[in-house]
Image (cartoon, rainbow, N blue to C red):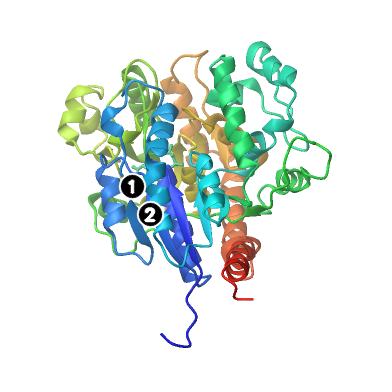
Amino acid sequence: MPGQESKTHVALLVSPGMGHLIPFLELANRLVLHHNLQATLFVVGTGSSSAESTLLQKPSLVNIVSLPHSLSSLDPNAPICDIIISMMTASFPFLRSSIAAVNPRPAALIVDLFGTPALSIAHELGMLGLVFMTTNAWYLSVSYLYPSFEKSMVDAHVYNHDPLVIPGCTPVRFEDTIEVFELNQEEVYVGFGRYARELGTADGILSNTWQDLEPTTLKALSEAGTLGYGKVNEVPIYPIGPLTRNGEPTLESEVLKWLDRQPDESVIYVSFGSGGTLCEEQITELAWGLELSQQRFVWVIRPPEGTESTGAFFTAGRGSSRDYWASKYLPEGFIKRTKEVGLVIPMWGPQAEILSHRSVRGFVTHCGWNSSLESIVNGVAMVTWPLYAEQKMNAALLTEEMGVAVRLRAEGQGVVERKEIEKKVRMIMEGKEGEGIRERVKELKISGGKAVTKGGSSYNSLARVASECDIFRRRRDGGY
Ligand code: UDP
C-alpha cells in the first residue's frame, strides 16, 4: 500500500523432528504477533508423521514452505544425527534458491542446531544469520564454548570419564554427558567441533531458557568473548524462553475427557517425547511400576525398538490400536486391572493439553527440553528418565540445580526396575519428600510466565532480536 512501509521479514529453517518444529513455530508466531515481523518457516520435514502434518496444516500467521528432502535415499540404520544432517544438506540448494527469489530479501535467517552450515548461505545472501538453540543454556555452553576446550580435557572426558569442565558453568559428569562424548570416537567429537565453530559465526544465538532460570550459565556465556577464552567468537546470546505451545482449550479428545473425570492433581502423565521408545522388558517394568504405585496415570506408549531404550523419530504420531498394545507388550491383565485408574494412548497424545489439565500433578519424562519446559510452565513436577541426546544433562539440571524433579535410576546399565518406578512416582505424587519439588516447580512456573510476558526478560530479549533485524534491514536496503 502506498505510504505504508513493509514489515521486516525473517526466514527460519527447521530440521526434522517435532522437538524442533514445535518451538520454531512458536518462535515464528511470536515474532509475528508480538514483534510485528513477517515470518517464513522453511521446514525440512519427514512427511512420515501424522502429528507433523496436523501441525503444519493448521491455519497460521506464518508462511510455511516445505523443502524437498531425501529420506528415501538414506540408510535407515544410520545414526539419527547423520540422517538429519544429510537431509538438511540436501535441502540447502532449495533453501538458497527460495530465499534468493524473495524480494525484498528477508533480513535474517534463523536456523536450529542442525542448520548451522546454512549460516554461510545467510551471510552470502546479505542477511543476518541467527541460531535458535531449542535447548537450555547449559547445553548451549558445551557447544558454544567447545572451541576453547583443551583437547586433553575432552580426551580425558571421553576416555577416562573425567568431568567436562566448562568455564563459569557447572561441570558435566560423564554419567550425564551428551551422546557425542559417550560414543568414544574421536571423529565424532571432531565433527561436533565443526558445528561448534559454525555456531561461533552466528550474529546471535537464541536459547529456550530465561535469565532467572540459569543466571550463572548465562553470565558465563555472555562473558565468553571477554574472559580471554580466545578461541570463542563473541556472539550475543538471547535467552527468549520458556517458549512453549499452549494447549488448545477447545481440543476434543478421549484423553482430555478422561482427565475431566479425575480429581485435581491426581494423575501422572508418562511420555518419552516425539521419538522415545523403550525396550520390551522395560515396557513390562514400567507397567508394573505404575500399577504398584496405585496412582492414576496416562501413558503414551510406542512399540519397542530393538533391545535398548532409545529414539525412533520418524514414526511419531502413527496410530495403532490399544488392543494391539495390550495383547502384544503389556503384562497380562494390565489394562483390565488398571481400567479404573489408567489410560494407555498408543503413539502420540496431545501433550500440551494434557500437561495443562488441572488433574495432572506429575510427569514421567525423557527430559527432552520442550517436554521439560512444558512441565515447568504448567507447574507439573517431574520424574526424569533420560534416553538419548543431551537428556541426561537435562535430567541433572532439573533434579540437582532446579529442584523440580526426582531421578529414576537404572540398575547398572540395565533396565529401571518396577520398585524404583513405584517409589519415585509415589514420591512425586503423594510423598512428603516430593512436597518441596512440587512447590519449587510452581515457583518456576510463575518465574517463566513473567519472563515471556510483555516487559519480562525474555520478551525484551526477543524484542531486541526483532529490533536488530529491523535495523539491519533498513541499513542494508538503504532506508537510512
Ligand atoms: N509431543 C506431543 N505428544 C506426544 C509426544 C510429544 O505433543 O505424544 C510433543 C511435546 O509436547 C514436545 C515435543 O513433542 O513439544 C517433543 O519435544 P522434546 O524436546 O520434549 O523431545 P524430543 O521429541 O525432541 O526428544
CA distance for labels 1 and 2: 9 Å
User: Mark on residue 67?
Assistant: 1
Q: Quadrant of the N terminus?
A: bottom left
Q: Position of residue 263 (x, y in %)?
A: 37, 53
Q: Mark 1 packing: few (<14 Cα in 10 Å), some, or many (20+)?
A: many
- Residue 101 in the figure: left or right of residue 9: left
> Which residue position is annotated with label 2?
98
The residue under label 2 is which amino acid type? Ser
Q: Quadrant of ligand 1?
A: top left
Q: Position of residue 137 (x, y in %)?
A: 64, 43
User: Mark on residue 218?
Assistant: none
Q: Quadrant of residue 328?
A: top left
The residue under label 1 is which amino acid type? Leu
Q: Quadrant of residue 175?
A: top right
Name which residue lies at 69% across and 48% down: 235
Q: Can residue 271 be seen?
A: no
Contact? badges 1 and 2 (CB < 8 Å): yes
Element under disc 2: helix
